[in-house]
Each structure stands twice: as structure tokens, then as C-alpha cells.
Image (tube, helix red, strand yellow):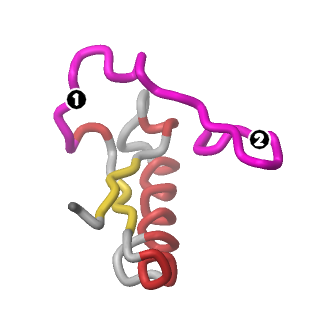
Amino acid sequence: MSREVDVFPRSGIDAPASPAVVEKILMLNGRLGEGSPFHESFGVYVEGIHKDVVVLPRQWDNRLVAVKVEDGSEYGRT
């Protein structure tokens, strides 16, 4: 089982290499990436990516699911 989770900002769907998306990817890597306190605590880590580095099936974005967190906000909407 992999200890790495590839994640990309939702805003990266339409503009994968924009400066704002790159900044979010760097933030993900810094806060949740390999060697971070998150990684040390939970044994898994996030690697921020943009959609151009992976091969995705057609209409993959139709399968996205919004997740609500306890405060009622949508999780992962960046």
C-alpha cells in the first residue's frame, strides 16, 4: 500500500499551471508532504500535483464528490 496520496487543487482543473495553483501545490507539499509533521503523525503524506502530470479517464471529473466537514463548509474547494 502506498503511503503517498496525490492531490491537486480543484482550481487546477481549468488552469493547471497558473501561479495561484502552483502556490497551492507548494502549500500542500509543505504542510502535508513527505517529512511534514502530518506525515510523521499519520504515516501518510500528500504530494501536490497538477492534472497534466497524470493520465485520467474520460469524464473523471463527473465522479468528484464534495465532502462536508463538521463546520458545514465544503472541504477541498480551493
Up/down of 29 relative to 12, above or below: below
Q: Secondary structure at mark 1?
A: loop
Count of numbered marks: 2
Up/down of 32 relative to 8, above or below: below
Rendering quarter of residue 58: top left
Between residues 46 and 17, which one lies in front from this camera angle?
Answer: 46
Instruction: Report the residue at 32% width, 53% height from top.
Output: 6
Q: Secondary structure at mark 2?
A: loop
Magenta stretch encompasses residue 66: yes
Residue furthest out toward the left: 55
Q: Amino acid at mark 1?
A: Leu
Q: Which residues are magenta?
A: 53-78
Q: Main secondary structure of the magenta part?
A: loop
Give the label on residue 56, or none. 1
Of labels 2 and 1, earlier in sequence is 1
Residue furthest out toward the right: 71
Magenta stretch encompasses residue 41: no
Quadrant housing the C terminus: top right
Up/down of 57 relative to 75, above or below: above
Instruction: Report the residue at 43% width, 57% height from top.
Output: 25
Q: Which residue is mark 2?
A: 73
The location of residue 23, given as percent across then percent down, is 49, 58
**Is 19 left or right of 35, judged from the image as shown?**
right
Alpha carbon of mark 2 to alpha carbon of mark 1: how far? 27 Å
Rendering quarter of residue 17: top left
| Circles 2 and 1: CB atoms closer than 8 Å | no
The location of residue 10, given as percent across then percent down, is 50, 37
